[in-house]
Image (spheres, rainbow, N blue to C red):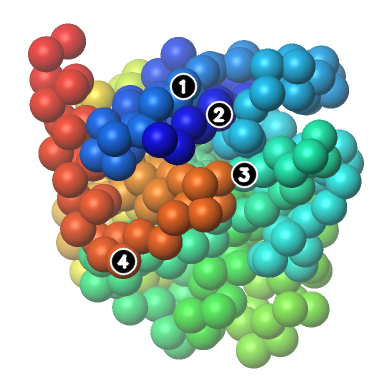
C-alpha cells in the first residue's frame, strides 16, 4: 500500500480545502497517509522545511505568502517552475527539496472547463504575487492580446509585466495602479489578491469597477463557503459568469498528487468532479 505524508505551508490556512481534497484522494486510491496544515510565514519557511524533513514528509504545497520565497530554499526547480520561478508544490527526494509549479496547469484547466476564450482578448488582473504570475503565464500561453496588471506596489507590477513580456512578446502586459479603470474593454476580470477571501460587503468598493464590458466574466482565485466580495461585485455588474478558485485548487492538487505518488491520473476532469462533489458534501454538514 502506498503511504503519503504531505501538507501545506502558508498563512492563513484555517479555511484551506487542501486537507479535505487529500482525504478524498487517500480514500479513492485506498492509500494510507496524512496531509497536515503547517502555518508558516515567509520568515518561518526554513523551520517548517526542517520539520517536514524530520517527519519524513514526501512533499508539501505552498500557498500565500510563501510561493516566491520558497524558490530561495529549494535545491532544484523542475518543469515550468524553472522558468516561472514560483513554486506551489515541493517534492522531497532523498532530503532534497524540489520545486514544481502546478498552478498554471490548474488555472488553464479551469479556463478550459468553463469555456472561457481569452485568445486576442484584453484581460484585467488584480495582484502581482505568485498566483498572478501563474495566471499571466497561462494567459500568455493562450494568446491573450493584453493583460492589465493592477496592483498597489508599482515595483512589483512593473517587474511582473517586464518578466512576462520577455516570455510572451505577442501579449501586451501593462502595469497599472490598483484602482485604475482601464479595464472597460476586458473580457475577463481576475482577482489574484487575498482580498477576495473576505466576504465583507464593503470590500467590493476596493476594486473601483463601476461598469464592465457586456458578457465579461469575473474570476476570483480565492474561494470560500460564501461568494467572495469580488464575485459579488461581478454579480452586481451582471457578469456573464462568476468563477471562484475551487476548480483551480482541485486541478493543481491532482497534479501535486501525481508528482508525489508517481501515479498518472487518466481522467482528470472526472476525478476533479468527484472531488468537488465530496467537498460539497463534507462542508454542507458544517
Ligand atoms: P502573494 O504571493 O502573497 O500575492 C498577493 C498579491 O495580492 C500581492 O500582489 C499583494 O500586493 C496583493 N495584496 C495583498 N493584500 C492586498 C491589499 N490589501 N490590497 C491590495 N493588494 C493586496 O499571494 P498569492 O499566492 O499570489 O495568492 C493570492 C490569492 O490567490 C490568495 O487569495 C490565494 O488563496 C489565491 N490562490 C488560489 C489558488 C487556487 O488554486 N484557487 C492558487 C493560488 C492562489 P503586494 O505586492 O503589494 O504585497
Which numbered disc covers residue 34? 1
Badge 3 marks a residue whose secondary structure is strand
Badge 4 marks a residue whose secondary structure is loop
* First reached walking from the N terminus: tag 4 or tag 2: 2
Residue at the spot of label 2: 6
Task: Look at the numbered disc 1 and say if its residue's Cβ is closer than 8 Å to ligand 1.
Answer: no
Q: Is residue 84 above or below residue 245?
A: below
Q: CA distance from mark 3 to mark 1?
A: 16 Å
Where is residue 17 shown, x and y percent of the image? 37, 28
Residue contact between numbered discs 2 and 1, judged by CB atoms under 8 Å? yes
Task: Look at the numbered disc 2 and say if its residue's Cβ is closer than 8 Å to ligand 1.
Answer: no
Instruction: Indicate the quadrant of ligand 1 in the picture.
Output: top right
Q: Bin the neighbour count of mark 3 within 10 Å (Cα to Cα): few under 14, some 14-19, many 20 and up.
A: many
Residue at the spot of label 4: 266
Nearer-the-camera pick, 265 or 227: 265
* First reached walking from the N terminus: tag 4 or tag 3: 3
Q: Tell me which corner region of the image, top left, top right, bottom left or bottom right, holds residue 9.
A: top right
Where is residue 273 shown, x and y percent of the image? 19, 50
In screen coordinates, is 286 left or right of 233? left
Q: Is residue 276 above or below residue 18?
A: below
In screen coordinates, is 208 left or right of 150? left
Identity of the residue drawn at 66% across and 72% down: 173
In screen coordinates, is 62 left or right of 143? right
Where is residue 57 shown, x and y percent of the image? 64, 27
Nearer-the-camera pick, 55 or 39: 55
User: Can residue 202 be spotted in the picture?
Assistant: no
Identity of the residue drawn at 54% across and 27% down: 5
Q: CA distance from mark 4 to mark 3?
A: 21 Å
Identity of the residue drawn at 62% across and 44% down: 89
Residue at the spot of label 3: 89
Badge 2 marks a residue whose secondary structure is strand
Amino acid at each position: 500500500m502506498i503511504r503519503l505524508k504531505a501538507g501545506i505551508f502558508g498563512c492563513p490556512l484555517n479555511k484551506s480545502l487542501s486537507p479535505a481534497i487529500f482525504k478524498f484522494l487517500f480514500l479513492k486510491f485506498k492509500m494510507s497517509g496524512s496531509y497536515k496544515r503547517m502555518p508558516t510565514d515567509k520568515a518561518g519557511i526554513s523551520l517548517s522545511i526542517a520539520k517536514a524533513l524530520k517527519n519524513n514528509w514526501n512533499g508539501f504545497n505552498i500557498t500565500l505568502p510563501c510561493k516566491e520565497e520558497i524558490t530561495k530554499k529549494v535545491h532544484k526547480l523542475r518543469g515550468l517552475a524553472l522558468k516561472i520561478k514560483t513554486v506551489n508544490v515541493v517534492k522531497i527526494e532523498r532530503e532534497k527539496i524540489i520545486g514544481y509549479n502546478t498552478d498554471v496547469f490548474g488555472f488553464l484547466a479551469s479556463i478550459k472547463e468553463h469555456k472561457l476564450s481569452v485568445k486576442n482578448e484584453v484581460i484585467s488582473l488584480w495582484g502581482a504575487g505568485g498566483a498572478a504570475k501563474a495566471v499571466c503565464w497561462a494567459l500568455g500561453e493562450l494568446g491573450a492580446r493584453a493583460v492589465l496588471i493592477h496592483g498597489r506596489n508599482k515595483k512589483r507590477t512593473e517587474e511582473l509585466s517586464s518578466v512576462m513580456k520577455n516570455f510572451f512578446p505577442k501579449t501586451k502586459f501593462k502595469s497599472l495602479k490598483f484602482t485604475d479603470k482601464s479595464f472597460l474593454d476586458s473580457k475577463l476580470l481576475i482577482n489574484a489578491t487575498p482580498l477576495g477571501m473576505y466576504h465583507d460587503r464593503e470590500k467590493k468598493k476596493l476594486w473601483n469597477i463601476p461598469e464592465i464590458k457586456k458578457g465579461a466574466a469575473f474570476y476570483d482565485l480565492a474561494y470560500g463557503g460564501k461568494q467572495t466580495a469580488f464575485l459579488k461585485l461581478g454579480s452586481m455588474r451582471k457578469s456573464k459568469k462568476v468563477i471562484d478558485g475551487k476548480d483551480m485548487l482541485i486541478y493543481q492538487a491532482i497534479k501535486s498528487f501525481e508528482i508525489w505518488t508517481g501515479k498518472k491520473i487518466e481522467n482528470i476532469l472526472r476525478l476533479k468532479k468527484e472531488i468537488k462533489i465530496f467537498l460539497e458534501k463534507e462542508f454542507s454538514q458544517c
